[in-house]
Image (cartoon, rainbow, N blue to C red):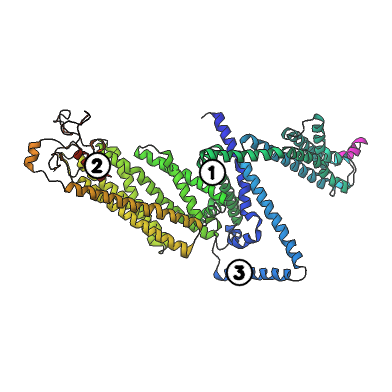
Amino acid sequence: MTFRAHALSFLDTALRVPPLFVMDEVLKCCFGFSRAIHVSYANILSDQNPFLNDEGFGELDTEDMKAWQVENDTASLLEAVDEGGGEGGDESMFSSFAPAIAKVLMFKLVYTAATITFLLSSQRLIKVYLVVASIAVILTGYQGNMAVVRHLTSPPQSTKPPVLMSALSLNTTALWDSGGTLSALTVNYVLQSSLGYLFTALCSGPQHPFLHKLIIVSFLLPTLSMLLSLPSQVLSTVPVAAALLPLAVVKYTVATNLLKCFQVVVEGYQYARRVMRDFGLHSLLESEWVRLNVPNVLRTFWMIRVAHHLVTLLGEFMYVHGEYQSLWALDMPAVYVIFKAVMTQGCETAVALLGMTSIVSYVSHYVGVVFQMILLTVEDDERSMGTVCAILFFILAEQSGLTVMEGEKRFIRLCRNFCLLFTAMLHFIHNMVNPVLMSLSASRNPALYRHVRALVVCSMLIFFPVVLLFVLWSFYPLSTWLLAVSAFSIQVIVKTLVSLLIYALFLVDAYRSTFWEKLDDYVYYIRAFGNSVEFVFGILLFFNGAWIYVFESGGSIRAFMMCIHAYFNIWCEARNGWTVFMKRRTAVNKINSLPEATQEQLENHDDVCAICFQGLHSAKITKCNHYFHSETERAPEQDIRGHQRDENVDTEELPVWGPARTNRKGKTTRICKTQRKIVKVFKRKRA
């Protein structure tokens, strides 16, 4: 990636961050429902300065305090109803609700405008920021002019003669005494002229040289008026009059582009409908996700937001201690308070939660990359650990109502979600190491370091859940969340042990000199045990979730996730397991119905199995006098154990599939009808 591409990507990311801050602030205000905010977010708002709070950050209110809040809220509500219930009640209620409705509509309009701005292309974003920068230049010039006017119209500067009059009358003494006035006017003159030229460069309105000169003069008008002996009332209104012309130019620019803005929104809507109709919603989301560079934008937004909170908290810590060198006095309790405050405020809105989710995705992705480097495997983009962990973290946060919780409760729920996410990452790592173990055991790979790497990862998958279970059960009481984490952890341990047992069996079979007929049965029993344990824990997790939904915290997202879990992890697994069991049972019964070959028959036959090409130490005889292994489950091209054919036997001369036969149409075949049935039975058993 070239430097120019990096610069453009950075610019696009930087341009899309401010709209996220606007949406975040609107969500903090709950679209203008300020009274509801102060009631439901009382703890958070009171703990913005945790170091000034004797109880620390986010302490829960006592029951008396909660009851006091409820009583006062009820009393204030009854008082408002009583006041509106008398004469003129309708007018008073309308006068109180009308500003509130207007405020809510204004916040919604701002949120919609910020969302549309976030979705714009880079070129249109630059045009929007040019207009915003023009308004910022006007406000800066206005504030500078007002500051100079207040300074020069207040005593003792107001008693001095005007600078222009002193210069025209050659009053050097007055000019010398007005050094502060002259310097203030000079600085403001330079500032306002620079702002005027900057405004003409930024504004995309009418490009007329005379208009540009008038705009520059309007910025300098308050400075020039201070040279004259005008009344204070007139001088105080000059900065406002000076800002009218630039504001009029900006308004004209916005008004002339309103129709174009509406056309852009309509074109975007039509484009979205067309892509959804032709390619589906998934394609639209994927293309827009890449175009907007959403992960980098969210990560940048969240890191800036957290940095702002962190600087604020460190400033409060220094203010409490009264020394600028007090940062060296940071101890572990203070660091814990800062960490808890940052993490709690880092997910207080939906936009902030998305930013935290992007950070979780980034960290999880590189954790997966580390384990891929250990296992020497390649990542599958469709099953990236970062993507899966991000989706899981966001769903856990939404179904638990993380953004609407109080400070301490939110931090506790966030820690619990991270524990669940950690167990999910262990499951994902097991899915990475399991095929590596099977491949190493089947291919008889002599590279010892690859075996050691896989076994080290498996030991970590057993060690971490055990330590987690020990810590949680030692320091936390029994709860539905603890049961869920324990179930997930035990599932990881059982799945890892099953993988290790199958790996060991395949290694033993790979170094055996004779065919191990019972191997497939042992593998089937071990896998059946692991699947049964996983199925039982799935049922336990379903009932645990049902208990949480009914008695602790319900919600549509939790109900939807329970339905998905019940269908995919319980119903589908039970149906697939029963289907495999019945197929295997049918295959075993059909194979057992065939007669067993004696040792004398095997010596007279002196051939290999027609399916696995292994020597016949025991065999079943079909009605057409063909010999097969009774325990064979895999065809030679699908033998994952890596058995080699007998080197002393020339397989090209063997009548593996029996004698050649010619049908009525003259076509020669080498597999009879009975053999086809046996192959189908073996395939059914293998499934």
- Most extreme residue toward the left, as rendered? 600
Q: Is residue 168 magenta?
A: yes
Q: Are marks 2 and 1 in contact (CB under 8 Å)?
A: no
Q: Are marks 3 and 1 in contact (CB under 8 Å)?
A: no
Q: Is residue 398 magenta?
A: no
Kind of element beneath mark 1: helix
Kind of element beneath mark 3: helix
Report which residue position mark 3 lands on: 70
Q: Which mark is residue 299?
A: 1
Comes first in the chain, label 3 or label 1: 3
What secondary structure is the magenta-colored segment mainly? helix
Residue in front for this viewpoint, 440 or 555: 555
Task: Decide: few, some or many residues near mark 3? Use Cα within 10 Å; few <14, some 14-19, many ≥20.
Answer: few
Where does residue 206 sit, x and y in percent of width and height?
A: 77, 33
> What's the residue type where badge 3 is placed?
Val
Q: Quadrant of residue 131?
A: top right
Instruction: Give the magenta-colored segment's residue range.
Output: 164-175
- Which residue does the image show at 61% across and 52% down from the upper left? 27
Residue in front for this viewpoint, 295 or 596: 596
Comes first in the chain, label 2 or label 1: 1
Q: Can the viewer see residue 293?
A: no
Q: Are marks 3 and 2 in contact (CB under 8 Å)?
A: no
Where does residue 544 sit, x and y in percent of width and height?
A: 41, 61
Q: Is residue 90 left or right of residue 226?
A: left
